[in-house]
Image (cartoon, rainbow, N blue to C red):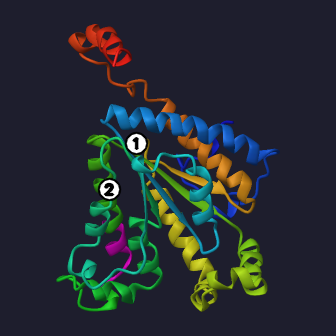
Amino acid sequence: MSTNSYQVSDSIKLEDVPTKQIVENAKSKLKKVRKKISKIQNTMYAHGKYSVLVCFQGMDTAGKDSLIREVFKTFNTRGINVHSFKQPSKLELQHDYLWRHYLALPQRGTFGIFNRTHYENVLVTRVHPEYILGENIPSIQNVEQVNDEFFNKRMEQINNFEKHLTENGTIIIKFFLNISKEEQKNRLLRRISFQEKNWKFSTADIKERKLWSKYMECYEDLLNKTSSNTSPWFVIPSDDKATSRLLVAETILKILSGYADIDEPVLDKKTLSELHSYKILLENE
């Protein structure tokens, strides 16, 4: 499956990007793809030179949690860590906005999954600029100063942050799970209607839904300003969860398969030449 069409390489308008696509037998196809990704993960763990950072953004109910569960369920747990970034804590607010994201970066040979990411700092805070005042930035005294210039500068900082990571061996893949407002409504109604899903419901979801247009405006801006060849954004149609999961998995597989230098390390010549004798020694115990 070609995933090039989902990459943000030119300026996009989200209103022109489809939110629904259905791939036949997506569930069975995903099983095969994630098996291939898991094999690459094992090789990367042994290779120990690259790390992978997979970022997920999307409106509430976009399916981030279940997608992460289904795409990475066959991974060896020693090679993957998932971080879900919520509202910054008191300690985190005593540092710059990227500090907590630095702490969660994957070590070489492993995958890091950001469920909501450093882009919350140019998304939620842009919709609610008053949140920035809680960061106690010396140059910001009032909410009027938290303007487009402020967020453009912050996106430039994020681009530099990601450039630094990629130049030092981190492979960054970013996904925006693109759902329609109508589909979000259906998913919220399911959370209300089915008791086993009630725990997922939050009144904040209804409040933020009223700001849908503003969120789409902010998403569109960040997608256009922070997607690059080395740190690309992919806009994934997510009204159909099975297809969304498959497209994400296919994209990850395609990108990682392009790294011809990821291979299992070879034993030194001396140890390699002695393997047979070690085998005999063990068999004769």
Q: Quadrant of residue 181?
A: bottom right
Going from the N terminus, do you reach mark 2 or mark 1 first? Answer: 2
Q: Position of residue 99 (x, y in %)?
A: 25, 68
* Position above or below: 246 against 152: above
Q: Is residue 51 left or right of residue 274?
A: right
Nearer-the-camera pick, 98 or 281: 281
How many neighbours does mark 2 have within 10 angstroms: few (below 14), some (14-19), or many (20 or more)?
A: many
Dominant secondary structure (helix, strand or loop) of the stretch shown in magenta: helix
What kind of element bears circle 2? loop
Estimate the spatial distance between the alpha carbons at disc 2 and disc 1, rounded to whole Å.
17 Å
Query: Which amino acid lies under the numbered mark 1 shown in the image of this protein?
Result: Thr
* Position above or below: 259 against 178: above
Nearer-the-camera pick, 279 or 127: 279
Q: Is residue 18 visible?
A: no
Q: Residue at x 61, y 91 (%)?
A: 203
* Position above or below: 257 against 169: above
Q: Looking at the figure, which quarter contains the N terminus? A: top right
The reply to whether the magenta stretch includes residue 198 is: no
Q: Looking at the figure, which quarter contains the C terminus? A: top left
Q: Residue at x 76, y 58 (%)?
A: 20
Q: Nearer the viewer, mark 2 or mark 1?
A: 2
Q: Is residue 186 visible?
A: yes
In this picture, which residue range is highlighted in magenta? 145-153
Residue marked by disc 1? 230
Residue marked by disc 2? 105
